[in-house]
Image: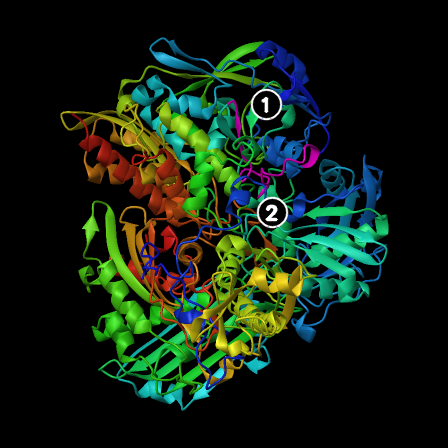
Amino acid sequence: MPIVINGVATEVPPDPRVSLLDLLRERLTMTGTKKGCNQGACGACTVLADGERILSCLALAVQYDGRRITTVEGLSENDTLHPLQQAFVEHDGFQCGYCTPGQICSAIGMVAEANRGAPCHVTADLAEETVVLTREQIRERMSGNLCRCGAHNGIVEAIAATYGDGAS
Amino acid sequence: MSENHDAARPAVKTAVGPAPDDWGPGRAPDPLSRHRSGTIGTRVSRVDGPLKVRGAATFAAEFRFDGMVYAALAFSTVPKGRITELDTAAAEGAPGVVLVMTYRNAPKITPLPEWYTEGKAVAGDTLPVMQDDRIHWNGQPIAVVLADTQEQADHAASLIRAGYEPEPAVTSFEQAKAAGRHPTFHYGRPLKTEISDAEAALAAAPVKVDEIYRTPFQNHNAIEPHAVTLAWDGDELVVHDASQAVVHTAWSLGYAFGLRQDQVHVSSPYVGGGFGGKSLWSHHILAAAAAKLAGRPVRAALTREGVYRVVGGRTKTEQRVAIGARPDGGFDALVHTGVVAMGRHNTMPPEPFITSTGSLYAARSFTLEVEAAHMDMLANTFMRAPGEAVGSFGLECAIDELADRLGMDPIELRVRNEPERNPTSGLPFSSRHLLEAYRVGAERFGWTERSPRPGTRSEGEWRVGMGVATASHPYIRLPGGEARITLTADGRVIIDVAAHEMGMGTETTTAIVAAERLGLDLDQVTVRQGDSRLPGLIMAGGAQQTAVIGGAVSAAHRALLAVLIELAGHDSPLAGLRPEEVGCVNGGLHKLEDPSRFESYTDILARAGRGEVSVEASGPPPLELTHWSMRSYGAMFCEARVNAVTGETRISRFLGSFDCGRIMNAKTAASQFRGGIIMGLGLALMEETHLDERHGRIMNPNLAEYHVPVHMDVPEIEVMWTDIPDPHSPMGAHGVGEIGITGVGAAVANAVYNATGRRVRDLPITLDKLL
Amino acid sequence: MRPFTYARAADAADAVRLADGGRARYLGGGTNLVDLARETVERPEALVDVTGLSTAIEEIGGGLLIGAAARNAAVAEHRAVRTRYPALARAIVAGASAQIRNMATVGGNILQRTRCAYFYDDGSRCNKRRPEQGCDAIEGFNRGHAVLGASAACVATHPSDMCVALAAFDATVHLRNADGERTLPITDLHRLPGNRPDLDTVLEPGELITAVELPALALAASSAYRKVRDRASYAFALVSVAAAIEVTDGIVSDVRIALGGVAHKPWRAWTAEAALRGGPATAERFRRAAEEELASAVALRHNAFKIELAERTITTVLTDLAGEQP
């Protein structure tokens, strides 16, 4: 079975060492997904596998045979930005733009987790199954995505404005 | 003024006349500095934003050449000595390998000269690159492997076996200091200032502090690792780089390979963060050499570990700060001296941690000095606000300690020592409103709620305290600014300038400024930057790009006015006017004294039968810097919580109140301030490069163990600014890229002291220091 | 990364067969093994993907049986884990990042290797990576290293948060190899380093973790996990404590304590538990029990603070838990 990337089926590379990240960037020239550390410490390579956020640098492509992968390139249609992408622009949720695709994919996966009530480190009551995406919840849940330019406030605002407790 | 407070904009746009020829004495301020129409100073989203959020902005490791191969590096494991054995056979025989390059087969490469030689050299050190068997630091590249895939190259590099004859190396700071402290220089001037006898004044002072402050090695850790994708085309070299100095890099690579600058084309349209680290390092040279040897284009994307092994960071400092004061708080003596670690072959100036100290306080005597202790390590380099970021930690903690001893509010102590002119140079200030920044910042932050007695406020397990510190960074405008303005028949302009977009918002700010100067809408301006073939020699460093580009664009604007009036000819309403008499508005020119004498750009060009008009000009030399003391200022307010059980520190509130001249783009400037502050929180609480002093090896060359702040570490950070234009700078603006990190370490440490009564004088403030 | 072959196991028996007595390495989510292989610390020639094994979380004798391929995030999210073993859910969400928790399997989490910088660095000496080579951590940067149960050969710590809660709750691991199946208390699975720090666990070559079993444990329902670290999220523990306590009429009737970040294995605080059982549930007694647990601690140059930190954290966690007792 092939990997389906943004709706397009792709054969796994013959070399099992190839990570999902390098498959995207070097074999498919889909460079929207970024390599920041290549060891699971920065989150820049975050993509969605069947809707769940994962680190494509630690994922051997061969393991994702038969899975559906969504990358940043799969979020917008032509020039119409995804609402979260638009919010990142509006709230200046980035500076250099390098961690940005990972932040955006991560946030989309994060919202799905929150919507089904997954707990996080700052969850006060584990029995509570409804997650209210407060600024604190967003910060904790997004902590696997580093930003060195210091756009943290804008990132959190963009997510909150799109999905948070005050979102329209 | 805060980012959310847009000044009211008049409905009718006003014209902008030409800026002065230069910014020396007797010149009127740039008319743009008080211009209140259009977008200048408002919240403008980044022009490159849509590209970046789609992942469509292309970075250095994302360009491709046909036939490209991938590079991997092998690194030394000893700090000093000779390579006695270098077994590359297994690597050469590994699948996909195209080339293994070592000192034995590397082409001839000329070592690069000292930093800024000819105003253009930007290599981190002066060492030969892979030309002999000598090792100069632990982690030095010893081999380059090229292979068809990155996986193959990485594996082959791991098969290289090296043996060494080690030589005695100085890899500990204590050892280095014992071996000798050396005087230091900063762009030719000694890092030493003495005014009166500060030690005697200190000894005689009734109240004093005299403490040692320490800051560790740090690394930039831009999320984009350094990378080049390059190809030779005959005697020409094309380099896709992650660079904050494209023209300098072209010149430097040309120097290394015996080429003219114009034979090297460096392109770097987007940079995934620089912070001082993205100048020229050995991977550039190794990649170009290997590409030449193999006859193939090369992608050399450093691993995160590779960045730590090849690219220097901020060095360690040990600072003595001593202040002697009178009972009323006035300073009799201010001593800021100490020693920094330096690589032996650095081209960079030492970490100049005293550069703010001589400007901030009206002391009666000063002794300021930085000495260097040499270590066998990778060259250290500039990192965001070199000098000030760490120097402000020592100085501003000492001020806080003195205030505590005097029983005086630390802001009041600063007020009492506010100078009228620069206390060490004697120059008048061009624009200094630090006390105003303090006043509005303190009010907004609620400074009066701070208890002057430390350790008196608790919430549950958390002890809560407030701290404050001064932020400061010099205004810089290096020579070399040039820009080209191309006006097209449809009334649009293109600004070409060899500047850099690393996230500072340069592209957007340049477009805003150009649109205002030319009386255009923002979407009528295109900015092209990040390419060595564009005009100018502009380093993205010292937070200077805004001023340098602004000066160059204003010069080109003057030239354009002259050309347009000439082109307009005798039949134009503009006939007979001089450039000084006209201003730009609504897509054309009018006489400043008589707006009815207007003609649009499209009409001028159409009548002249021109498809476009293009002018190129150099910014005037930075005369302003010789006549005024020019700095940016800020007041940093921090609320810290320290856990009484575990010693963990969390920052619950932070406010930066800045005085940085006129702000060009409220949105991106706020982000630059915040970005600096957040990097400052890292410096305060967690950042440290672990150099194992036994053998000089960096032990945390990764983002898991080198901690930078994560989202959960970053509270909502409030920023505000005076927005008072500097009458002596282009647009009345100062750079804002670096000041944000300054003063943060001290504001945090002072808040921690206020929370706990514990004074931590060595960064980072980790929990073990507070148990 | 050296070249390797890749095979996907259909079930546990298939995995054990494919592993061929340890010639191949089991691959879970890849969050540790892929990194280590890239760093050439691990040099597998064959990988057997075991993410196709059971991911079920099932009731078993009043406890829970968690398939080894269950993702960390799925365990933390599971209703029964959240309500009956909250310290386990808390430990998991305190670890790594959400992305990693979505990838990492329970089996892989248990078998993750130390983050000692010298273990990771090919330019340093490490007995865990190369037996008999020497240890550069003992005299090097050892702020994050072990204070309990270390040896002259190794001072590394086990990095898992999840395992600390599992150790506190007397979890057992279900194992399978070519000869059959067995179970082992998780507290007996990981080793202390002794003179063989290259061996993290007592697993036989080719042996596979197929499941983790949490026994019925009423007091676990009000358990706590507290992690102390250098940043507010996404950092390994300097010290962590998983604990549960049952207080009857002011007397400790039962207690479970385990520590993370202090030893080569998740450290079950048997000494402190014994000291507390049957005694008064007071902060003072908690403090003394913690001190007894740490009495054998040995500090290196940079990690002495961990002893005090562990004592304080144990005391506070127990005090808070006792204060919440009905």
Q: Secondary structure at mark 1?
A: loop
Please tell me how crowded label 2 is: few (under 14), some (14-19), or many (20+) other residues with Cα within 10 Å: many
- Check the picture and name the quadrant holding the C terminus of chain A: top left
Q: Secondary structure at mark 2?
A: helix
Q: Report the magenta residues as a range.
A: A26-50
- Check the picture and name the quadrant holding the N terminus of chain A: top right
The residue positioned farthest toward the front in the image shown: B571
Q: Which residue is mark 1?
A: A7
Q: Is residue A111 above or below residue C236?
A: above
Describe residue B399's horizontal placement relative to residue B223 as left or right: left
> What is the CA distance from the residue labelled 2 to the residue labelled 1?
32 Å
Describe residue B169's horizontal placement relative to residue B675 as left or right: right
Describe residue B137's horizontal placement relative to residue B442 as left or right: right
The residue positioned farthest toward the bottom in the image shown: B196
Q: In which quarter of the view is residue B264 placed? A: bottom right
Label for residue B304?
2
